Image: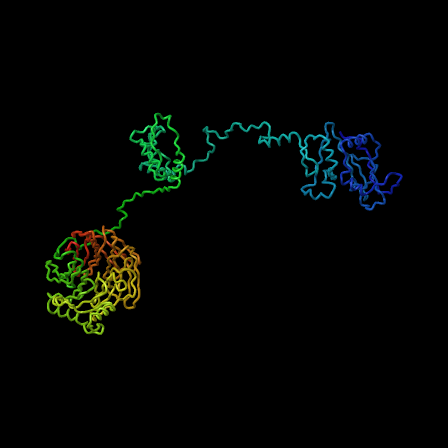
């Protein structure tokens, strides 16, 4: 309860500081007074406060306690008591209180001021335990670090900073820990933060992850706010919208999707359930147990099943003898066929532990870890659909399909053949050293010439219908022949062409001595002369040219004045170009690039195609420069031919490939055809002017492949290649089949020379 006597106590404000005599007491040092005030000198212990309160209650003389006065000779007159620093000097009036219980007093300025009576609390009211609140507001308390107070209470009084220091620490150590002590500092008051028992219990429950509220059941049953019970009355009486009566298109699509799945068998309605099978299986069975259908799952390869010699009681024939055991132990562990020796035991309980068990398991894990396993998806594609849509061979007639005539008479292989420009006569050459001329339609041999004891490797008619000149190569000589069975006008024209070169400046004078002739032959690319044998002159040999090595191939220029010979063993002089009108020979290359296999003239341009083992190079003879290098990709090129239009080239190789090159498209093959089983010996285009887009290839497998090769005038259209017919008739002799092929200049007839000693015409 509030002491009512304190309400009638008169307050006497302190007056101005007066000088104090030394007899009245000891003088107060201002510095000491300041230090005591800052260090909490105004604070008192609980016992001292209680005793002073008791003394104050007993003193009821109506006078206020007087504050100590400061000495007059203080250096700082502004230092006054911190407790009454801001109080105003007021003069109390002995006036009566009005009807509201308030008194009117005058302040220091002479203005009236109201003093309200204190509230007379009831008996049950007690604020003795009320804690003073700091009402400084939202202000950083660090601003009060230099002041003795920490804030203001609700009445505007300063709240002094609690005492702290060594004295307080010694006091706390001597006293017991009070109730509610936390050891934390209250930032608002600057004192100790004390918590009640209820607050401590809440903190304890929170630290233990418990519910701080008493009586809360966290496992209470769920309250169903919306039950599954269907009510009779609707929640809304609004009319049903139209969309609820229109069938949903989305649902219709979903239903149709399910219907299609049922029709296709992907969904089986009312599928009977299969009885559950026991989860037991044979570990040595071929079919692995069912695994999850996972795209990346690849089962590991299974170990082979155990054999009889791995049994603990193997048969007697599997038990090794002492000699076999000693031989097994003497071998190196890496060379042993097996890592163990079969042993026989009377019972399974007598079988010892396998000492290589860990090694085998480790090697098995290495095999599974290091051996890559790749899943290959098998495409369900019809192979026929991958093939290009080609026209039927029946729609591409005519092309040769049957044997019409067989030309037999050579002893040994028939190495070369050629058809004259008129299309009436066929010339053949073989290993017997003869050149024979046949009548194409009847197959009758009309002329024969024993040219050389060596094999005749090449024979070609001069491409001029007004003359009848045959060029035949035997060894390192080229013989120019005029068959005597032609009419006199043709023979005279042929002899005139061959005799024009004699006496020209290009042909050096004949030397008298054999040594000089040999030296001239060595220096020149080719030596032109008349045949030394009079019998050859009588049989039709007019002139011959000698080169440095054996001639394997011979080809004519389209005008008939030049022809080229190929001698693969002559290295830099492998290709020699001969001029008929001047009886001269020259080598167009100073240094050969590889072993030369074939040489062909361009049908319309001054271009020479030279084929080595792996490349085909085209040279401009007029400008004397390399134009293009084709890369067929073959290991060893065997033959070469140029299309009559000059824009396409076919190449045959000993590795059984026929390659079509489009010169305007790329240096790589446009098509690669693999139809032969053995090496390809010769390839030829049909050069007739009747629109026969045909070409063929001859191989050592004894067959001739005929193809349709249409080349379009439109540069945007690719050539059309269609296989037509496989011609079989020649017999393979000593690993050789068909050695040469040639087309008829006008008709769709094909001639072939075989190693069986015959030549055939196909129509």
Q: Quick one: 451 or 134, which is closer to the camera? A: 451
Identify the residue at image location x=22%, y=74%: 505
Identify the residue at image location x=64%, y=29%: 198
**Image quarter in which the C terminus is found:** bottom left
Q: Is residue 729 above or below residue 154?
A: below
* Residue 473 coordinates in the image, percent (x, y): 19, 63
Q: Seen in the image, is 179 located left or right of residue 660?
A: right
Asked which quadrant contains residue 550, the reply is bottom left
Asked which quadrant contains residue 316, the reply is top left
Q: Quick one: 70 or 384, which is closer to the camera? A: 384
Whether residue 393 can be seen here:
no
* Residue 126 coordinates in the image, percent (x, y): 73, 29
The image shows a total of numbered marks equal to: 0
Whether residue 245 can be seen here:
yes
Q: Residue furthest right?
A: 23
* Residue 128 coordinates in the image, percent (x, y): 73, 31
Q: Seen in the image, is 595 located left or right of residue 116?
A: left
Q: Quick one: 591 or 119, which is closer to the camera? A: 591
Q: Is residue 741 above or below residue 172?
A: below
**Image quarter in which the N terminus is found:** top right
* Residue 417 coordinates in the image, percent (x, y): 17, 59
């Amino acid at each position: 309860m509030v002491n009512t006597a304190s309400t009638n106590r008169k307050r006497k404000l302190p007056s101005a500081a007066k000088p104090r005599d030394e007899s009245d007491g000891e003088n107060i040092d201002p510095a000491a007074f300041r230090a005591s005030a800052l260090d909490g000198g105004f604070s008192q212990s609980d016992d001292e406060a209680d005793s002073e309160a008791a003394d104050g209650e007993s003193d009821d003389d109506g006078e206020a306690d007087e504050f100590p006065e400061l000495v007059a000779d203080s250096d700082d007159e502004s230092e006054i008591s911190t407790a009454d620093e801001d109080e105003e000097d007021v003069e109390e009036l002995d006036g009566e209180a009005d009807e509201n219980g308030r008194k009117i007093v005058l302040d220091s300025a002479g203005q009236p001021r109201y003093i309200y009576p204190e509230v007379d609390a009831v008996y049950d009211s007690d604020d003795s335990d009320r804690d003073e609140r700091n009402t400084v507001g939202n202000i950083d308390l660090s601003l009060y670090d230099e002041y003795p107070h920490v804030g203001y209470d609700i009445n505007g009084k300063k709240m002094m900073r609690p005492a702290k220091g060594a004295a307080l620490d010694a006091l706390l150590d001597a006293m017991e820990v009070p109730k509610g002590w936390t050891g934390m500092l209250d930032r608002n008051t600057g004192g100790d933060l004390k918590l009640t028992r209820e607050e401590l219990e809440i903190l304890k429950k929170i630290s233990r992850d418990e519910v701080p509220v008493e009586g809360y059941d966290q496992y209470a049953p769920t309250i169903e706010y919306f039950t599954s019970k269907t009510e009779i009355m609707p929640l809304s009486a609004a009319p049903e919208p139209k969309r609820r009566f229109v069938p949903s298109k989305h649902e219709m699509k979903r239903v149709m999707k399910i219907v299609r799945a049922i029709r296709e068998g992907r969904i089986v309605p009312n599928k009977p359930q299969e009885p559950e099978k026991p989860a037991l299986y044979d570990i040595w069975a071929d079919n692995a147990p069912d695994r999850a259908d996972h795209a990346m799952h690849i089962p590991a390869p299974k170990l082979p099943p155990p054999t009889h010699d791995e049994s603990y009681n193997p048969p007697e024939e599997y038990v090794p003898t002492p000699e076999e055991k000693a031989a097994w132990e003497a071998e190196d562990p890496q060379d042993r066929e097996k890592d163990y020796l079969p042993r026989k035991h009377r019972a399974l309980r007598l079988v010892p532990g396998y000492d290589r068990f860990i090694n085998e398991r480790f090697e098995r894990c290495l095999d599974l870890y290091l051996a890559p396993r790749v899943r290959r998806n098998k495409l369900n594609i019809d192979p026929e659909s991958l093939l290009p849509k080609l026209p039927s061979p029946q729609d591409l007639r005519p092309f040769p399909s049957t044997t019409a005539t067989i030309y037999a008479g050579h002893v040994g292989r028939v190495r070369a053949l050629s058809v004259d420009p008129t299309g009436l006569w066929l010339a053949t050459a073989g290993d017997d050293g003869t050149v024979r001329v046949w009548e194409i339609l009847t197959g009758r041999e009309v002329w024969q010439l024993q040219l050389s004891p060596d094999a005749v490797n090449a024979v070609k008619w001069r491409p001029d219908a007004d003359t009848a000149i045959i060029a035949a190569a035997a060894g390192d000589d080229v013989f120019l022949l005029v068959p005597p069975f032609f009419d006199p006008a043709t023979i005279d024209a042929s002899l005139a062409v061959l005799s024009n070169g004699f006496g020209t400046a290009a042909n050096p004078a004949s030397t008298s001595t054999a040594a000089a002739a040999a030296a001239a032959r060595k220096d020149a690319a080719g030596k032109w002369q008349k045949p030394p044998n009079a019998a050859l002159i009588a049989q039709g040999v007019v002139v011959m040219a000698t080169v440095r090595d054996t001639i394997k191939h011979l080809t004519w220029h389209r005008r008939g004045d030049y022809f080229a010979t190929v001698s693969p063993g002559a290295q830099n002089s492998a290709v020699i170009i001969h001029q008929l009108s001047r009886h001269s020979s020259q080598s167009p290359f100073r240094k050969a690039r590889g072993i030369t296999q074939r040489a062909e003239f361009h049908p319309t341009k001054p271009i020479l195609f030279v084929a080595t083992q792996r490349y085909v190079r085209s040279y401009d003879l007029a400008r004397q420069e390399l134009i293009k290098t084709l890369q067929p990709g073959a290991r060893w090129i065997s033959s070469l031919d140029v299309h009559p239009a000059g824009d396409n080239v076919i190449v045959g190789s000993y590795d059984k490939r026929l390659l079509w090159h489009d010169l305007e498209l790329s240096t790589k093959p446009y098509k690669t055809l693999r139809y032969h089983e053995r090496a390809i010996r010769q390839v030829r285009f049909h050069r007739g002017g009747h629109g026969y887009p045909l070409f063929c290839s001859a191989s050592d497998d004894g067959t001739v492949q005929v193809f349709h090769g249409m080349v379009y005038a439109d540069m945007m259209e690719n050539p059309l290649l269609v296989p037509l017919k496989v011609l079989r008739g020649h017999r393979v002799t000593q690993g050789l089949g068909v050695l040469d092929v040639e087309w008829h200049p006008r008709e769709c007839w094909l001639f072939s020379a075989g190693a069986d000693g015959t030549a055939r015409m196909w129509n």
